[in-house]
Amino acid sequence: MDNQSEMNISESPSPRVPESSKICFVFPGQGSQHVGMGKEIYENFGEAKEIFGEASDALGYDVSRLCFEGPETELNKTFRTQPCILTASIAIQRVLSSQSIVPSVVAGHSLGEYSALVAAGVMSFRDAVKLTEKRGLFMQEAVPEGRGLMAVILGLKRDEVDEICLSLQSGYAAPANYNCPGQIVIAGEKEAVEEAMKLAKEAGAKRALPLAVSVPSHCTLMADASKRLGELLEGIDFNSPTTPIVNNADAMFLNNIESIKVSLVRQLNSPLLWEDSIKAIADSGITAFVEVGPGKVLSGLIKRIEESAKTCNVQDLKSLELTLSSLAT
């Protein structure tokens, strides 16, 4: 994880996607979880049952029961949420693969980047599900509960939010997610984020709302979690991606193992460039995006970034049928 590795990231070229294959799989992150996620897919496809079984074996508890029955308070604990979303997402991805729906590019939003890495063959599912549990624990332990906060700012430009964060008098807050035009998430110390919300409203923001999360992700408060994650990654077997992957931290196509490791560490304490990532993917020739996993948050963001893109999502039997039908046309 040296300077040369970071140089490799910035110099990664954007490949041109062949005309015959223009599908990108995008994988959701924390916040998309809900009790019941993946249940219909699990009950109807053997591939999905195998993934849930593998997750339960790796983590030592019944992942399917937690995903399907809750309780919600337990599912919403960060160290439970992350492996559970990963499991539901990869179960669905395996079902799509069995239906001959294979992406030419993959990407994921925050936690979803780990699902993308599994789909691209970079790491095994078993390693990823244990890794995301640890990642959740590291994040929870990095900042004492109640000290940090995240908030979404709607209706301001990037430079306006950047300037607000730089002007704060009460502490540290910074942009955490550049999600789409007019939607930026900030993170930091609780009082500073609250001050930023007030200043954003005074600057003309349509809304400035606190998010129901206890961990201020993707800012420098996660430095300790990033360090611990980096040490953990050294013990994980990584493979070169079989499918191009676009990362969060740089919105670049990554093509070597070391740059991927560097990116995962930086992802925790630097802002997510989701808007830039989708633009880079679209510029490569992608015309269709399939959100693979619970919820439809990413589909909505993509339509605001690339209005002409076709978007689908798969989270249950109905959405699977609709997606298969849409992609066939």
Image: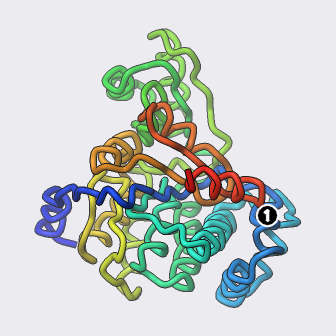
- Secondary structure, mark 1, is helix
Q: Is residue 133 left or right of residue 242?
A: right
Q: Nearer the viewer, residue 145 or 239?
A: 239
Q: Residue at x 37, y 53 (%)?
A: 248
Q: Residue at x 45, y 64 (%)?
A: 103
The residue at which mark 1 appears reads as: 74
Q: Is residue 38 left or right of residue 69?
A: left
**Residue 30 visible:** yes
**Residue 172 visible:** no
Give the percent coordinates (x, y) of residue 171: 43, 33
Mark 1 burial class by Cα count in 10 Å: few <14, some 14-19, many 20+: few
Q: Nearer the viewer, residue 50 or 77?
A: 50
Amino acid at circle 1: Glu
Give the percent coordinates (x, y) of residue 5: 17, 69
* Quarter of the N terminus within the rendering: bottom left
Q: Nearer the viewer, residue 312 or 52?
A: 312
Give the percent coordinates (x, y) of residue 115: 52, 68
